[in-house]
Image (spheres, rainbow, N blue to C red):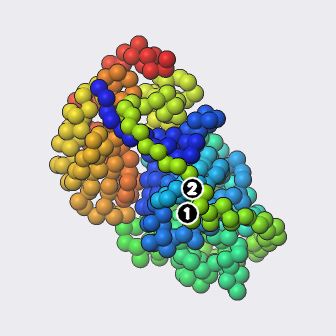
Amino acid sequence: MNLEKRQTRVGNYELGRTLGEGTFAKVKYARNTKTGQSVAIKVLDKEQVIMHKMAEQIKREISIMKLVKHPNIIQICEVMGSKKKIYIVLELVTGGELFDKIATQGRLKEEEARKYFQQLINGVDFCHSRGVYHRDLKPENLLLDANGILKISDFGMSALSQQLKADGLLHTTCGTPNYVAPEVLNNKGYDGATADTWSCGVILFVLMAGYLPFDDPNLMTLYKKILQADFTFPPWFSSGAKKLIKRMLDPNPKSKGYTPAEFVEDEIIDLDDIDAVFKEEHLVKEERETKPAAMNAFDLISLSKGLNLSGLFDKQQDLVKRETRFTSMHPPKEIVSSIEAAARPLGFDVEKRDFKMKLQGANRGRKGNLSVATQVSEVAPSLFMVEMRKAGGDTLEFHKFFKNISHGLKDIIWKEEQADTTEITKVSK
Ligand code: PIT
C-alpha cells in the first residue's frame, strides 16, 4: 500500500509531518540531510504575511528569539526564505504542549508542578533580564522536550523594552484572556515583567488545580473576575503554594513595592539576514518529490523515546504519545470513510484530500469553530497511524471531540492487547 505524499526539501532540510498549526503558520518536523540533525521549521506564507501587515511582527519575533538563548526557551537555529515562504528553523522538541499533559492526565502533584514552574520562571526571568516580555504565556506555549524539559515557545506577541511608550509602559493588549493580567485589560499601560508574572501565577494554578482560576463564558464577567482577582483555591493546595500564587495574582502589583528590573544591556541584532528572507535575494531552493507517505525512521524516532519504538504505543511511559493519535490495521480508505461517518453526526463538515482530512465544526465554541486536521500515515506494513490535530478553536473542546470520535471509531482502532510485537520490531530495522 503506497500512500502518495509530496516530500518538500528546503535548503538542506527535508520537511516532514506537521507538528502544529496556527492561523498564519505551520510548524513542521524537518531533518538536515547533511548533518542528520532534526529540527522544527515554522513555515510562513510571504504573501499572507505581507497582506496582513505582519512583516514587522515576524522580524521582531525573529530578533527577539535571537536575543533569548536559554535552555528553557525554544532556540532559533536559522532563517531562510524562498520565493513564497519564510522558514524559521527552530530547536526540535517532541514532548508536546504542557497543556496536553494537563488536558489528558489532569492536574499535577505539587512536586511535578514545581519542577515545571521553576523552569518556567528560569526562562521568563532570563527573557526579562534581556528586556523581552513574552506577553502570551500559557500552557499551550510551553513545550516539553523528550526529557520533560520545559521550553517556552511562541514569541509572536513578545515585546522588546525598546517598544515602551514615554511613560515607560507597554500599551498593546495581548494574550489570551484567561491568562492576562488585570493591568493589561484596563488599558492604562502596564509593565511587561509584572504582566508575565501574573500569567505565570495563572499557569501554576492551572498545573496544580487542573482548571483555570478565572473563567467565565461571558467575556465581561471574566474580565471582572480578573480585575478583582476573584478566585478560590481548591482544598488540596499547600499553604506555601497558596501564598505564592496569591502574591503573583495581585491586581495591584505596584502596591507591594515592586521595582521592575532595569534594562541595561542592549545587544544589537543584525537585521540584514532577516530582511533578506523577505526579499528576492539569497533564496533557498524548494524542491518537491513524490514519495510514499510511509513515515521514515526519523519521523518514528521523533515520535518515540530514543530508539525504543514500543514507546509509540505506550501511554504511560511516553510523553510524546498524545491522546490525539491512534493506530489501525484497517485499509486507509476505510479509515478515512470511518472518520467521515463518525464526524458528520457530531456536526462536522468533512473535506478530504488524499489521506488528509479537514473536519470543520458547525457550532461556534469558546474560541470560534473547532477545526480538526487529520492525517493517515503508514507506520509499518498494514499498520496505519491516524493523527488528529487542532487546526482552530478551543483546545479543551478539541480533546472532548477526540474522545467522542474515538468512541465512534473503536471498531477500527488497533488495541494494544492485539499488538503483535514482531510487527513493531520490523519498523526499527
Ligand atoms: C518545536 C516543536 C513544536 C512546535 C515548535 C517547536 C514551535 C516553536 C515556536 C513557535 C513560534 C515561536 C517560537 C517557537 O515564535 O511542536 O520544536 O511561533
Q: Does dot 1 land on a helix, a strand or a loop?
A: loop
Residue at 55 percent of width and 63 percent of height:
280
**Does the residue at mark 1 contact the one at mark 2 (Cβ under 8 Å)?**
yes
Q: Residue furthest right?
A: 264
Is 42 or 84 nearer to us in this picture?
Answer: 84
Q: Which residue is mark 2?
A: 283
Q: Is mark 2 within 8 Å of ligand 1?
A: no
Is 67 or 280 nearer to us in this picture?
Answer: 280
Bin the neighbour count of mark 1 within 10 Å (Cα to Cα): few under 14, some 14-19, many 20 and up. Answer: few
Could you say where residue 150 lies in the image, as x and y percent from the top left? 62, 46
Could you say where residue 329 lies in the image, as x and y percent from the top left? 29, 25
Q: Is mark 1 within 8 Å of ligand 1?
A: no
Q: Which residue is mark 1?
A: 280
Decide if residue 30 is on the left or right side of residue 274: left
Residue at 38 percent of width and 37 percent of height:
290
Q: Three-letter amino acid code at disc 1?
A: Glu
Residue at 56 percent of width and 77 percent of height:
172
Residue at 22 percent of width and 34 percent of height:
333
Bin the neighbour count of mark 2 within 10 Å (Cα to Cα): few under 14, some 14-19, many 20 and up. Answer: some
Q: Quadrant of residue 160?
A: bottom right
Disc sitting over residue 263 in the figure: none
Q: Quadrant of residue 259?
A: bottom right
User: Label 1, label 2: how many angstroms apart (C-alpha)?
Assistant: 6 Å
Could you say where residue 185 lies in the image, as x and y percent from the top left? 53, 77
Q: Does dot 2 land on a helix, a strand or a loop?
A: loop
Q: Residue furthest top?
A: 422
Residue 141 visible from this viewpoint: no
Residue 288 visible from this viewpoint: yes
Q: Three-letter amino acid code at disc 2?
A: Leu
In which quadrant is the N terminus drawn?
Answer: top left
Q: Quadrant of residue 112?
A: top right
Decide if residue 241 is on the left or right side of residue 263: left
